[in-house]
Every structure is written in structure tokens, then in C-alpha cells.
Amino acid sequence: MGNKMKSHSGAKKRFKKTATGKIRRRSKNLNHFNEKMSSRRKRRLNGPQLVAKADEKRINEMLSS
């Protein structure tokens, strides 16, 4: 009997797939020490980013089950 693979819980929380199949992620450097950051930098880091092409395959394997 082959057991089903489970999708990676950490990956589920961090990544979302777009309608075209690309993977979105949050920017890094927005958790703390934001007071000393310029507003311009915080705005630039705000909003979703796309995952690099090289990492897409690995993340897809973690998300699909």
C-alpha cells in the first residue's frame, strides 16, 4: 500500500500560486527594525514578489500532494 504524501505545512503558509501557475511570496526584511527604515524602502518591500524560476520546482513539490 502506497501512502499519500502530505503537502509541506510551512510552505502552505508562505506561498500562494497565481492563476497562471507562478508562485508568490512575501518580501524579507519586514518583520522588525522597521522604525529605522525609510518609508520608501518599506513601500518597495511591501506587496507580493514572485519566486525565482530556479526555486519554483522545489516549492511546487512541497505544495502539491
Image (cartoon, helix red, strand yellow):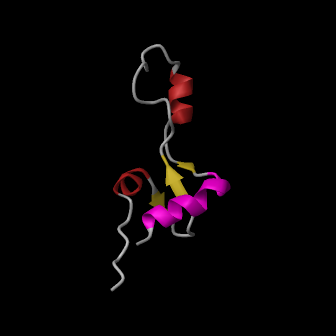
The main secondary structure of the magenta stretch is: helix
Pinpoint residue 33: horizontal percent, then vertical percent. 42, 18
Q: Quadrant of residue 57?
A: bottom right
Confirm whether the magenta stretch covers residue 53. yes
Q: Residue at x 38, y 65 (%)?
A: 7
x and y percentages locating residue 32 in the rendered image? 40, 23
Is residue 37 toward the left or the right of residue 56 in the image?
Answer: left
- Residue farthest to the bottom, as pictured: 1
Whether residue 9 is situated above or below residue 44 in the rendered picture: below
For the residue pair 16 and 47, the one nearer the viewer reads as 16
Residue 21, image quadrant? bottom right
Report the front residue among 50 and 62.
62
Residue depicted at 47% across the width and 44% down the height: 26
Q: Nearer the viewer, residue 59 or 36?
A: 59
Which residue is located at x 42 percent, y 16 percent? 35
Residue range of the region highlighted in magenta in the rendering: 52-63
Question: Which residue lies at the image location 34% right of the left edge and 56% below the top edge?
Answer: 9
Q: Quadrant of the N terminus?
A: bottom left
| Front-most of residues 59 and 24 | 59
Residue 51 x, y percent position in the rendering: 58, 52
Residue most extreme to the front: 1
Q: Is residue 57 magenta?
A: yes
Residue 24, x across and y down, in percent: 51, 54
